[in-house]
Image (cartoon, grey):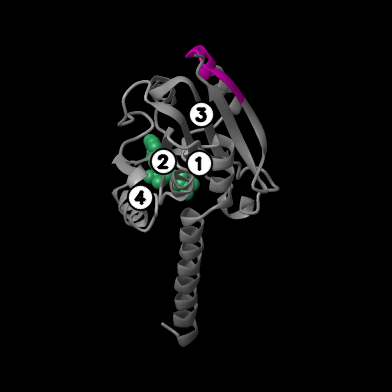
Amino acid sequence: MSHDHHRHDHDKGFMANVHWLLKVHKFWQADTNRAIVDMVDPQPGESLLDIGAGMGPATVLAAARGASVVAVDPSGLMRSICGVRRLFQRARGRITVESGTAENLPVAGGSMDALWTVNSVHHWVDLDLAFAELARVLAPGGRLVLMDEDFTHPDHPMHETHHGHEDEMTAVHVEAIAASLGDLGLDATGQKTVAAGVPVKLIRATKPI
Ligand SMILES: C[S@@+](CC[C@H](N)C(=O)[O-])C[C@H]1O[C@@H](n2cnc3c(N)ncnc32)[C@H](O)[C@@H]1O
């Protein structure tokens, strides 16, 4: 291998590391997570659920507002990171990290005042099963917010790097999802909008009392 070629490989490896570090930063603390917590508007004493919580950026913000939060994620790595992060929170006594998926939520029926997810709906494998779970776990009067960044939108700052993988992911159609939640008895709306300065797909719903 020539010297130049070797250096080229090295640079590629370096750039991959930088790319990964930028991703870690985003998973650790993203403005979209701050935005969704503002939308959910957690109240002290409430029981909340963060589905596909990842490293827990929204969980820690919601718990800091006085709510109890169950952070659910199927990834052992993500749960480990979220669990260690939990230890550094003043609100750690109000945070629980659990294994689970949107399709199989590890919480009792009617037990959650609110639930949300950021950037996980496109990972869900069985949307109908997941929607039934959302409707099951919400308490009467409970609310939900589902947010997925819209990388297909040309205005999204990561459009160039993230666009094109849609075929490998579950499609997120806001109107169809709102209609499915409506069929389950929730009052739901879906829209494409902007949150924290980026295009997002957003579904909001409440469970009638
Ligand atoms: C892009 S990350 C988003 C993490 C976090 N919500 C955030 O905004 O930083 C997607 C997360 O969804 C999780 N996930 C994958 N399949 C899932 C499923 N079926 N149900 C719930 N979460 C899932 C992944 O393990 C991952 O942590």
Q: Of the residues tagged 3 and 4, which is closer to the observer?
A: 4
The disc, 2 or 4, on the residue closer to the chain's N-terminal end is 2
Residue at which label 4 appears: 92
- Considering every residue shown, the one lying at the far bottom of the view is 3
Name the disc covering residue 52, or none.
2
| Helix, strand or loop status at disc 3 | strand
The disc, 1 or 2, on the residue closer to the chain's N-terminal end is 2
User: In the image, what residue type sits under mark 4?
Assistant: Arg
Q: Is mark 2 within 8 Å of ligand 1?
A: yes
Alpha carbon distance from label 1 to label 2: 7 Å
Q: Residues within 10 Å of mark 2 (few under 14, many from 20)?
A: many
Q: Residues within 10 Å of mark 3 (few under 14, many from 20)?
A: many
Residue 188 spot, x, y in % from top left: 57, 21
Q: Is residue 4 left or right of residue 39?
A: left
Q: In which quarter of the image is ligand 1?
A: top left
Q: Is mark 1 within 8 Å of ligand 1?
A: yes
| Helix, strand or loop status at disc 4 | helix
Alpha carbon distance from label 1 to label 4: 21 Å
The disc, 1 or 4, on the residue closer to the chain's N-terminal end is 4
Q: Residue at x 37, y 56 (%)?
A: 85
Alpha carbon distance from label 1 to label 3: 11 Å
The disc, 2 or 3, on the residue closer to the chain's N-terminal end is 2
Residue 190 spot, x, y in % from top left: 61, 26
Q: Can residue 147 be seen in this view?
A: yes
Q: Residues within 10 Å of mark 1 (few under 14, many from 20)?
A: many
Residue at which label 3 appears: 144
Q: Is residue 169 magenta?
A: no
Residue at which label 1 appears: 118
